[in-house]
Amino acid sequence: MNATTTQTRHITVDALRGFAVMGILWVNITAFGFPEMAYISPIISTPGSVSDIASWMASFILFDGKMRSIFSLLFGASMMLVIERANANGQSPARVHYSRMFWLAIFGLAHFYLLWWGDILFLYAASGAVVYLLRDWSGEKLIKGGVLIYIISSVLLIIGMGTMFILQNEAAQPGASQEILDEFALMLDKIGASKERLAAETDLYRGSFSQILMDKLTNQGLNPFKNLILGPLESIPLMMIGMGLYKSGFLLGQGDLKSYHRLALWGTLIGAMAFVALAGLAAYGNFEVILMMNITQAWSSLPRLLMAIGYVSILILGIQRFARHPLLHRVAAAGRVAFSNYLGTSIVMAFIFYGWGLGLFGTIGRAEMILFVLSTWTTMLLWSKPWLMRFRYGPLEWLWRSLARREVQLMKITN
């Protein structure tokens, strides 16, 4: 592979990762600043004003799940890059990969317990450990297998979550037994939608660091392991698709131009139409919590994949057209240090919203939160490229690499 191709490959994958890590914050900002259930509905923890609803709808239609899906696709592609480099350097791909996944899991657990409940790194490490076993599959087999698993998982999720309506309907019947009413109340409490749970969560995150940590250890300690169920439901099939798209050259910008245009148009259009319809259904149903759980967690899963592939296609076309643009190179730099940007964002947002920092949890409107997102995007674009002009890796990328290789890596670029 010549230097030009290598450079194009890197800027394509890095820029995609940069766009994804920036977009993820748009969605996650709500989960930093409000109780968890506020993520699914604009009338939880906020007045449900026009700006609240408009902000939620914009996030739901444009970003929700799509950026995470792209990130998962790219994780699979990055795995293949690491495997290729290990083979080229005469190293054991399995040893390199599983060492990386082990330390990623440690970072993920630290992220969860010390900073934020919404960590995905531990899930990615576990999913990556499984997907590695499929590394020798052909690109076509990986894509078809990943899509099939994703579809089956989505259908099962839709059916499973649909049972919530049955209990809700039974509890709404005149003369419903106290047992049914208690069961329904328990379900609302478990998903964090009861008034008591929302109030308790707000009080918790307005508290001290030690209070939050103790709650993580005593009440949420097993959550990272419980969340591994999301592996076969989403992360594993998406990583498989990403590995396949890398092997086919699609994620490297080497696919057929007509395919990119076709997927950009139809994937984004069909996916967006479905999300607009779901947003309309949510508004029609007055954002009722059980309906919203099904819309955001289950019914949106299939169009989410379509829209994520559509976004990737649009971005690749844009990257090819503006490959020399300075702004694109800053986005690519943000992607090269995505690990530092992802965890760095958690540090900053936890400080802004939690009681051990500025204590703004539950006090900022949804629309106003966008200002934090834009300012953080600006920071990512400003620091990433100058840093990489002086250093080989981002600070956390360097730490991860050094731990995984059990050797301190050369950090500073020397001429």
Image (tube, grey):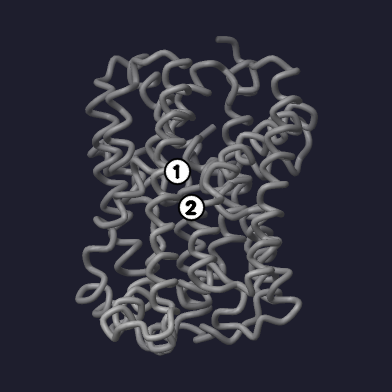
Q: Position of residue 173 (x, y in %)?
A: 43, 79
Quarter containing the N terminus: top right
Q: Position of residue 5 (x, y in %)?
A: 62, 16
Q: Nearer the viewer, residue 122 or 151?
A: 151
Which residue lies at the image location 36% right of the left edge and 49% below the top edge? Answer: 230
Q: Are marks 2 and 1 in contact (CB under 8 Å)?
A: yes
**Position of 386 compared to 112: left or right?**
right
Dot 2: what SS? helix
Above or below for 87 versus 200? above
Dot 1: what SS? helix
Mark 1 lies on residue: 154
Q: Position of residue 338 (x, y in %)?
A: 51, 47
Q: Amino acid at mark 2?
A: Ala
Which residue lies at the image location 51% right of the left edge and 79% below the top edge? Answer: 353
| 10 Å crowding of disc 2: few (<14), some (14-19), many (20+) | many
Q: Position of residue 243 (x, y in %)?
A: 45, 25
Which residue lies at the image location 63% right of the left edge and 63% below the top edge? Answer: 376
**Position of 343 compared to 222: left or right?**
right
Mark 2 lies on residue: 298
**Position of 37 compared to 15: left or right?**
left
Q: Nearer the viewer, residue 365 or 104?
A: 365
- Furthest residue to the front? 175
| 10 Å crowding of disc 1: few (<14), some (14-19), many (20+) | many
